[in-house]
Image (cartoon, grey):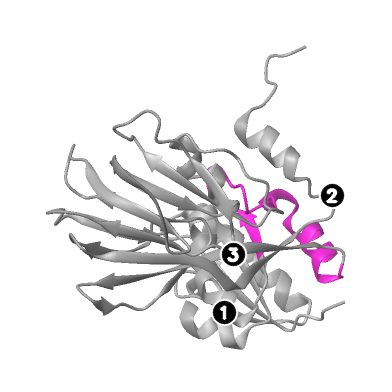
Amino acid sequence: MTEFRHVGIVAKRDDAAVLTTVERLARYLLNRGLSILPDAIAAPVTPAAPISRAEMGPQCDLCIVVGGDGTLLDAGRYMAPHDVPIVGVNRGRLGFMVDVSPDDMSARLDEILDGQGIREDRLMIEGHPDVQGDPIKRFLALNDVVVRNRAFARLLEFDTRINGEFVTRHRADGIVISTPTGSTAYALSSGGPIVHTGIDALTLVPICPHTLSDRPLVINANSELEVVVHGDNTEALVTWDGQVSHPLAGGDRIRIRASDKRLTLIHPPGYDYFHILRSKLHWGRGQA
């Protein structure tokens, strides 16, 4: 059993209900004798001084996110490099990954802090653009790396290569390169398959392809993928989890591969992946 002593608190911005939950959470953790490290959003309703999310990773041994999946995605980029596990308290909308309800937060956290939680390591990917021959810093993503056109109603022309081998040339609005975690996000809405989070795979999902035969492709996560932007595409963009972005132009390329780092999520006892899918995607509703 891992003993947690220093707990980071990451909160969704601009939400009064989130701050109410953070205030309760801070009291709970302090009553258990734990130190808290709140981010700038959470700090005003706690007795602790704020700390940046970048500084939080090296200093905490557990991170609790109060918000939705987007807040957890952001926290994950800072926690994964330091092997800090994350617990999610759902104050968002859909909440595939933030699976602790605010209504029974104390009871669920008691179980997790007492060592009864279910740990799950999630595959992350990293993408590093090569812009005009100049390599740019690589970034981590838990859900997806997306290459798309910023221009309204214009197709993007680009090639994909896997382990150096040419796959095809695409004409589409863009492409989603998704982890299993991200397979229920942008990739799913673009027509991609749901991939179980226990499978090490990447999914390539073209966005609104010009050719109907340009279908999603599932590949081994050990593969190295390269996307090369073609022609006079001067308004292309690459994004990581929809939160970090960098412009691309014709001739630029981005290399994407599985990261050596994984993000550890801690779920409450009784966590069931298929129950999450049923409840969030409304499977079986209206059936006898």
Badge 2 vs badge 3, beta-carbon distance below 8 Å = no
The residues bearing labels 3 and 1 have C-alpha atoms spaced at a distance of 19 Å
Q: Examine the structure image and report whether residue 22 is included in the region drawn in magenta.
A: no
Q: Considering the numbered disc 3 on the image, is that residue within a helix, a strand or a loop? A: loop
Judging by the rendered image, the residue that carries numbered circle 3 is 222
Foreground pick, 239 / 10? 239
Foreground pick, 133 / 75? 133
Badge 3 vs badge 1, beta-carbon distance below 8 Å = no
Name the spot of residue 226 as percent of width and height, x first.
39, 61
Q: Which residues are magenta?
A: 87-115
Judging by the rendered image, the residue that carries numbered circle 1 is 81
Foreground pick, 126 / 59? 126
The residues bearing labels 2 and 3 have C-alpha atoms spaced at a distance of 31 Å
Name the spot of residue 91 as percent of width and height, x first.
57, 51
Image quadrant where one finds the N terminus = bottom right
Residue type for callout 2: Gly
Q: Which of the two labelled residues, at mark 2 and mark 1, occupies the earlier sequence position?
A: 1
Q: Examine the structure image and report whether residue 108 is included in the region drawn in magenta.
A: yes
Closer to the eye: label 2 or 1: 1
Q: What residue lies at 39% left-to-right and 41% top-to-bottom?
A: 206
Classify 10 Å Cα crowding around label 2: few (below 14), some (14-19), many (20 and above).
few
Closer to the eye: label 3 or 1: 3
The numbered mark at residue 270 is 2
Image quadrant where one finds the C terminus = top right
For residue 85, what is the image quadrant? bottom right
Q: Which of the two labelled residues, at mark 3 and mark 1, occupies the earlier sequence position?
A: 1
